[in-house]
Image (cartoon, rainbow, N blue to C red):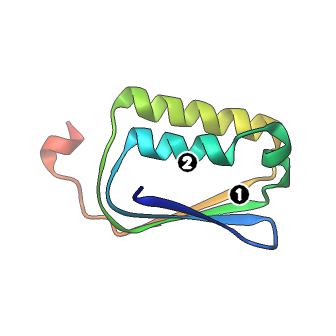
Amino acid sequence: MPLSITYIEDGGIIVRGEGLLTGSEIKEVNDIIYESPEKIERLLYQLVDFTDVSDISISNAEVEKLAIQDIRAFKVDKLVKSLFTCHCEEPSDEAIS
């Protein structure tokens, strides 16, 4: 799997990605992170490092599912913080339309 989860002793996690990612792979990781309300309550923060990701293949429906997961987690624990880092290029005109 091109995604890994590292649990930090202080209650946070680091999610690292590499290569080509798909929406279903990201959802699988979210399923693990948000497995139960108790697990969410113990989570203080998540750092998501996509600097080694070459591309993400994801549909609008998959983005919506990921957003729903995050909204549900936020309802359990409003104090969870997330930080994303990636190497981003300016999108092409085709990607924007």
Instruction: Decide if residue 94 is on the left or right side of residue 69.
Output: left
How far apart in space, not on screen, are marks 2 and 1 (Cα)? 17 Å
Three-letter amino acid code at the position of disc 2: Val
Q: Residue at x 64, y 46 (%)?
A: 32
Front label number (2 vs 1): 2
Question: In this rendering, would 25 be left or right of 96?
Answer: right
Assign the N terminus to one quadrant of the image: bottom left
Query: Observer-nearest residue: 81 or 58?
Result: 58
Residue toward you, 61 or 29 = 29
The amino acid type found where label 1 is placed reads Lys
Query: In this rendering, would 13 be left or right of 61?
Result: right
Q: Position of residue 6 (x, y in %)?
A: 63, 67
Of all residues shown, which one is farthest toward the front? 1
The x and y percentages for residue 83 are 59, 63
Residue 61 marker: none
The C terminus sits in image quarter: top left
Q: Are marks 2 and 1 in contact (CB under 8 Å)?
A: no
Q: Residues within 10 Å of mark 2 (few under 14, many from 20)?
A: some
Mark 2 and mark 1 lie on one chain; the one further toward the N terminus is: 2
Q: Quadrant of residue 14?
A: bottom right
Asked which secondary structure carries label 2, the reply is helix
Secondary-structure class at tag 1: strand
Question: Would you place residue 31 above or below residue 90 in this image?
Answer: above
| Residue plotted at (62% across, 35% down) | 69
Q: Which residue is mark 1?
A: 81
* Residue indicated by mark 2: 29
Q: Decide: is 51 above or below 1.
A: below
Q: Where residue 77 sits in the image (x, y, percent)?
A: 82, 44
Q: Residue at x 26, y 64 (%)?
A: 89
Total numbered badges shown on the rendered structure: 2
> How far across and how far down the image is residue 57, in percent?
29, 44
Q: Nearer the viewer, residue 51 or 88?
A: 51
